[in-house]
Image: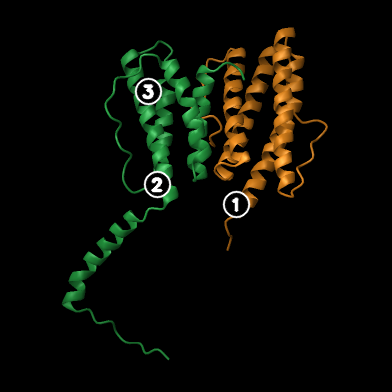
Amino acid sequence: VQEDRPVRLTRRTVLLLPLAAAGCRAGKRRRLPASVRADRALLATAIAAERRLLAAYDTLTPPDSARPQHAAHLAALLARWPAPGAPPSPPSVGAPADLAATLRAGIGPLSAAALAAHDGAVAAVLASVAAAHAAAVEPLP
Amino acid sequence: VSRPAAPGAALGAALGSAVRVEQQAVYAYGVVAAHQDRADRRTALRRLAEHESRRDGWAALLHAMGVSPPAGAPAYALPFAVTDRATAAALAVRVESAVAGAAWDLVAASPPGSPARSGAVRALADAATWLLHWQRAGGAATPPVALPGAPG
């Protein structure tokens, strides 16, 4: 039989509680599952590629700009970024000069990322971005 | 209290939906092909054959899971009257959008690296490419779909 006993909070426990809570949060950050870390790496690569494409559209301003589509891709990828934290910013490299070649070169890695992603929702977004890029530059299969 | 569906159940449901969508696509592409000139009819019939192949592929994966694939119907109701090349192209756009949606769901429901995931990623890319083809063939001024297959 358990006895109902009031919990006694001493000055020391009250002072240490916030520290313990912060320690738990930090511990959780360190223990991010391997599958989530792997998906973050896939997303980070795709997000960096879309940011570079958007920079290229801003530099080259092609007449039939697909910039809104790529902005939608970036938004969808960012929406799938698992907390905590934000995706890293890409290193500042020059914008690609050939948009079609850049899109074409990105299809394989995006498809591979979609195949490998652990989270189904992440995989679906990666596959859809790959599909949109393929539709933009590839002939009919 | 409802429980989340087991991974196998979600995959089975997504595969079943993909089979049903491909069955409808095969029927619809017969209608689309009938309203094309000779060159474009060949193109439409090629895509019809691809949908048949994909339908059979998804059905085979269901069989491997010990699940009977859904039976196809002899005919399907069309969403609107198809009377010429423009309405045929609009029907093809509708079909490829549905195929892309089924592929999206299948990508999401399938395990990483699995044959179902791999096939669904390819199916989504093919549907997006054909979707854009028929949008252009129909003279649509709408921009390409940003995220093919995405819900909503």
Three-letter code, disc 3: Leu
Which chain is displayed in orange in the rendered image? B
Residue appearing at x 60%, y 25% in the figure: B126
Q: Nearer the viewer, residue A10 or B55?
A: B55
* Residue A136 percent coordinates (x, y): 50, 19
* Residue A71 percent coordinates (x, y): 39, 27
Q: Mark 1, mark 2: which one is toward the viewer?
A: 2
Which comes before the other along the chain, label 2 or label 3? Answer: 2
Q: CA distance from mark 2 to mark 3?
A: 24 Å
* Residue B79 percent coordinates (x, y): 70, 28
Q: Which residue is mark 3?
A: A53
Residue B7's disc is 1
Q: Nearer the viewer, residue A106 or B129?
A: A106
Residue appearing at x 76%, y 21% in the figure: B30
Q: Answer yes or no: do the residues labelled 1 and 2 have beta carbons within 8 Å?
A: no
Callouts 2 and 3 in the same chain: yes
Q: Residues within 10 Å of mark 3 (few under 14, many from 20)?
A: many
Q: Which residue is mark 2?
A: A37
Q: Is label 2 in a helix, a strand or a loop?
A: helix
Q: Is residue B48 visible?
A: yes
Q: Is label 3 in a helix, a strand or a loop?
A: helix
Which chain is displayed in green in the rendered image? A
